[in-house]
Amino acid sequence: MKAVTRSRLFWPAAVLAVLLVANLAFTPDFFAVHVRGGHLYGSLIDILHFGAPLILVALGMTLVIATGGIDLSVGSTVAISGALACLHISESADPGGLATLLGALGIALGTALLLGAVNGLLVAKAGVQPIIATLILMVAGRGVAQLITDGQIITVTSDPYKMIGGGYWLTMPFAILLSAAVVLATVLLTRSTALGLLLESVGGNPVASRLVGIRATRLVALVYVFSALCAALAGLMVSSNVSAADGNNAGLWIELDAILAVVLGGTSLNGGRFSLGGTVLGALIIQTLSTTVYTIGIPPETTLVFKAFVVIAVCLIQSPAFRAKLAARGTRTRRTTRPHAAAPTNREVGA
């Protein structure tokens, strides 16, 4: 049992299971999955569907944090990619054409590639602190997204584009399948090759990694590019799901949810060892918590406060130091409350 609880995935999985089971008290058919028109529907499907963009953003954030960095610009990248794609489709003569879709994807992903390269060069080459380098794009990128949309919400009508975030394939929402494919490819790339160990070595001890010949600069730049690409895919999902681009609100604060998902998954913000499976569980915890809030009917003005208290509780439960202190206090309490042997009476002493 100790070996199981020591696993990095145990506590995130346990917390997710508790949150899911707790919903049964408010929604008896919470675990029910129905098939309507050849599509799967249900609360569990909704959690996976609406959590897919966060999973992608958190996936890229995990590799960035593994190298000892941070990427605050993913929210702006989400907004920019969705805005560029929707703008291209809205100005096209054939909005529903395959060539238009490929052009929109190329523009969005190409721009994200450029934005990620800028972040990577600032951090790896120029030596700018990651939080400062990405904060620049976080602030400026949101303004760029609003310039692209001209401060308006761009609506599009394109069935191929709608497929990315709101369509279905093989009875499942396509967004779930796309995010699962990206997660699987990332796991294979980082765990079936030496790339994962190289990233951990760069994040754990960058000086030693350079001394043994690891090209840390190139690796650091690449993870920021990967993070931007993941954010761009998330932006395409978000905008295509509602068939619109909102440069002001799309991806707003998703960078904080992504960082929180990485932490809940057991990856240290100090860099080094990382857990992709834990990150996926962390993102699902956040999405399940949001679903639970709306299911219970908590007033909107107290939603963030409620989520904050739950997140604090989850972090404390996952903390080995906190659990050790609780165990030590429990041991002391049992010792102090243990009944003492009764003192011998005078008659017993005389006998």
Image (cartoon, helix red, strand yellow):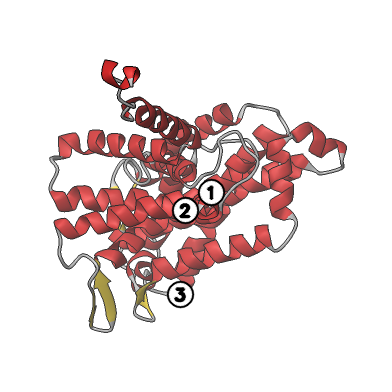
- Identify the amino acid type marked 3: Leu
| Left/right of residue 268 with respect to residue 128 in the rendered view | left
Q: Please give the residue where the numbered disc 2 appears in the rendered image.
A: 10
Q: Residue at x 69, y 46 (%)?
A: 199
Q: Mark 1: give few (<14), some (14-19) or many (20+) Cα within 10 Å.
A: few
- Identify the amino acid type marked 1: Arg
Q: Are marks 2 and 1 in contact (CB under 8 Å)?
A: yes
| Left/right of residue 29 with respect to residue 286 in the rendered view | left
Nearer the observer, disc 3 or disc 1? 1
Q: On the image, which quarter does residue 176 sit in?
A: bottom left
Q: Please give the residue where the numbered disc 3 appears in the rendered image.
A: 98
Q: Residue furthest front?
A: 351
Q: Are marks 3 and 2 in contact (CB under 8 Å)?
A: no
Q: Mark 3: give few (<14), some (14-19) or many (20+) Cα within 10 Å.
A: some
Q: Earlier in the sequence, mark 3 or mark 2?
A: 2
Up/down of 207 relative to 165, above or below = above
Label 3: state its secondary structure.
helix
Q: Is residue 167 visible?
A: yes
Q: Position of residue 186 (x, y in %)?
A: 60, 60
